[in-house]
Amino acid sequence: MTRLAVTTISFAPDFELCVALNRSVLANSPATVQHHIIVPRSDLKLFGRLAGSRTHIRCEDDFLPRTFVPVPLVNIKINLRRPFPPVRGWIQQQVIKLAAAAASEDDAMLIADSDVEFFRPFSSEIFVQDGTVRFFRGPNQIDKQLPRHVIWHRIARELLGLPAADPPYADYISSLLAWDPMIVRRILARVEATTGRAWATAIASQLHFSEFVLYGVFVDGVIGAPANSFASDDPLCRSYWEHAPLNPESAAHFIRQVRPTDVAALIQSKSRTPLEVRQAIFAALRDAHDTGRRSHRPAGDHQGFDPAG
């Protein structure tokens, strides 16, 4: 039996979103799928309300080196092994993801942020095929018009000891990604061998870094087949990345754009979309799935969206 787990890094401001995500994981996956939610120590009591037989609340400190110490009043830590630059919150989250994956005993780890929600059933068969974990890759999607992504690729190649390469590069970033924990362990060992430092120190000292790009570059540039033999450019997740809140018109458009293969959707928390609008969108998506299953109509073809819920 293939073991699949969903992993989410969250914190108190995203609690309500994480509640909805957790509920959707439990409702749309087999009983064998576990949900691991990793939060700051100060938020353990709040998130502890979600703990259950399939939901496990973990402290982020369990996945960070003891040399990472907090700086009062700001969302950064200092790595005593390399105090500069400080470990910013975004980099710290990536270190936690990598550490959690490396410690996982599952066959595949599905990474979903708090602002993701599942609206269709999913199982390990979607993400693991003949023992190979699904690999997201959009060929030739990254060029100099995306300078930050270009830097992420350069840094990944340096950390992995790979020669420089010119764009275009593949895009390895999506809202819903599956990782093979065994591959993550190989990545971190390679980073340590290349840099001569503990992997967390090598990564946390970077000003620019993407854990998803590191994983993708390693799979394509170091392992190759069979690790990238189950590659796809289908994200399986309809995403809204804009900062403007969704309104009734844009929400209806968002729903119409859902693909038949999508099992989840992301509405970025930074968009400040009101909770009641989010709830109405996902209710409409669930209803469209149920209706489409009965009538074979595409799930995105839904005319009954009610922004008032």
Image (tube, grey):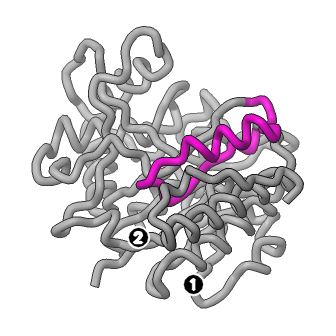
Q: Which mark is residue 54?
A: 1
Q: Which residue is mark 2?
A: 104
**Is residue 295 something one can see in this rendering?**
yes
Residue 54, position as x, y percentages in the image = 57, 84
**Is residue 195 something one can see in this rendering?**
no
Residue 260 sits inside the magenta stretch: yes
Q: Earlier in the sequence, mark 1 or mark 2?
A: 1
Q: Is residue 202 above or below residue 236?
A: above
- Give the residue at x 58% y 39%: 91
Q: Residue furthest front?
A: 295
Q: Quadrant of the N terminus?
A: bottom left
Q: Is residue 195 above or below residue 50?
A: above
Asked if labels 2 and 1 touch by Cβ distance under 8 angstroms, the answer is no
Secondary structure category for the residue under label 1: loop
Q: Nearer the viewer, residue 117 or 159?
A: 117
Residue 69, position as x, y percentages in the image = 68, 49
Residue 150, position as x, y percentages in the image = 40, 18
The amino acid sitting under disc 2 is Ser
Task: Write the start and end of the magenta stretch as one range.
Answer: 243-270
The amino acid sitting under disc 1 is Arg
Q: Residue furthest top?
A: 144
